[in-house]
Image: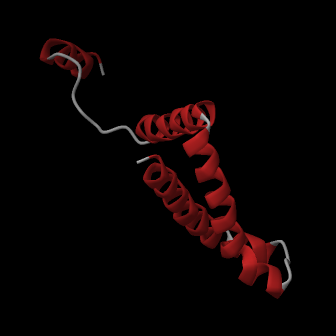
Amino acid sequence: MRVLRIALYMGLMGVLGWFLAALAIPAAIGWELSEAGVHALPIYGFLAGLALGLCMALVVAVRDTWRAAGAVGVRGSRVCNPVRSETRPARALAAAQVSS
C-alpha cells in the first residue's frame, strides 16, 4: 500500500510540475532562454514534480506544507474573486438606498 501511495504522489506531482512548466514556456521565451532549454523545460518540471512527490510521500512535514499552500491558494482565489451574494439584511439595504 505504501508503494502505491508513493507512486500516486509522484505521478500527480510529476504531471502538475509538467503542466506548470509548460505554462512557463512563454515566459522562458521572453527571457530569451535557448531553444533547447525551452524544449527541455516540461521535462525538468516533470522531474522536479517527481522529486517533490517522493518527498511528499516520505516526509509528513513536506506533505503538510504543500497541503497548506494548496489551501491558501484555494482560499486566496475565493478572496480575490468572491462570489457576489447578498449578505446584508433587507432593512440595511433599504437604508443604504435611501441615504444615497
Seen in the image, is 30 located left or right of residue 83? right
Write down the quadrant of residue 34 in the picture. bottom right
- Residue 91 image position (x, y, % from top left): 14, 12
Q: Residue furthest left?
A: 90
In the picture shown, does residue 1 fall above or below 61? below
- Who's the residue at 50% across and 58% down the image? 7
- Who's the residue at 68% across and 65% down the image? 47
Q: Residue furthest bottom?
A: 35
Seen in the image, is 8 located left or right of residue 92? right
> Depth check: 3 or 88 in front?
3
> Depth check: 36 or 5 in front?
5
In the picture shown, does residue 14 fall above or below 54? below
Seen in the image, is 34 located left or right of residue 7? right
- Residue 74 image position (x, y, % from top left): 44, 40
Quarter placement of the C terminus: top left
- Who's the residue at 20% across and 19% down the image? 93
In the picture shown, does residue 96 fall above or below 16? above
Coloring applied to the structure:
secondary structure
In the picture shown, does residue 78 fall above or below 99? below
